Image: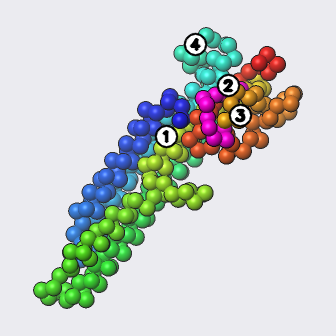
Amino acid sequence: MADSKYEAQIAELVRYYKRAIADIQAELDRFDLTDFKRANQTALLKSVADILASLNEDAAKWVEENIPAAARQGVAEAILALGVVNTLEQARQLVKFNRVNAQLVQAAVEDTQADLLAVTQNVDKKVKATVRQVVAESMRSNLAKGVNGRKTMNADTLAGLRQKLGSALNSGIIDASGRRWKPEVYVDMVTRTKMMRLTNEATMNEAVQRGANYGIISSHGAKDACGKWEGKIVKLVQDAPGDYTYIGDIPNRELFHPNCAHTVSPIRRPDMY
């Protein structure tokens, strides 16, 4: 399970997406499939666009606040692990981004905002395509029965079109590996992963600046490929002395994969462990 220190923040972001998806679903449910006025379709798509625009604003604010906070957490954890202070609260008072971490944070903010924007763009694209397809099918069905006649679309046809409309929000996000995610689940995964990775990167950057070139991988009884790295000492820089694995050489599928909860704690003397 991922580190609990970001649970509340991630849950807040996920709520934004769940609320937006529910609002869009309500708009789709209200849409009259028997009324073919173009204005009705335009109004529906405008409502969906407004919901997604508001979501993008909320998500951008969340990123600007919480992504830098994850890096500050990493710096504080490095300061504490290296014995500079005795408590995490004292360490937080000393947090200041070095040049590398400042650049890291800026890139992480931009990357996370781009990933979240891609989610809303995906939803917008699929909703538009599905609405237009369903409207076209509905119009053809009524034309076949006589638009002005007494025969109207039967209940089964209408139900099928309604189901198709609802599927626009269930088709999910397909990642680079071909895995399919519901929008809110994808948002949870991608932000959780980025925050944990950012915390670890900021920890390592601060540690190296303070002369600590080694780290220990955390342990929590992982059963996947991460498990073999638990408690292992790793190099934080490639040219550090000693027969230890450089952390940058460990494949992501084995450590720091999506939703990975492992952290690295810096140490100065690996021979003391």
Mark 1 vs mark 4: which is more N-terminal?
A: 1
Q: CA distance from mark 2 to mark 3?
A: 13 Å
Query: Comparing marks 2 and 1, which lies closer to the viewer?
Result: 2
* Image quarter in which the C terminus is found: top right
Dot 1 amino acid type: Val
Mark 4 vs mark 3: which is more N-terminal?
A: 4
Dot 2 amino acid type: Ser
Main secondary structure type of the part rendered in magenta: loop
The residue to which callout 3 is attached is 229
Q: Could you say which quadrant of the image residue 95 lies in?
A: top right
Mark 2 vs mark 4: which is more N-terminal?
A: 4
Closer to us: 110 or 212: 212
Q: Is residue 67 above or below residue 134?
A: above
The residue to which callout 1 is attached is 63
Identify the magenta region.
Answer: 216-226
The residue to which callout 2 is attached is 265
User: Horizontal and vertical percent for residue 247?
Assistant: 75, 36
The residue to which callout 4 is attached is 87
Q: CA distance from mark 1 to mark 4?
A: 27 Å
Q: Is-magenta flag for residue 199? A: no
Dot 4 amino acid type: Thr
Alpha-carbon neighbours of circle 4 within 10 Å: few (<14), some, or many (≥20)? some
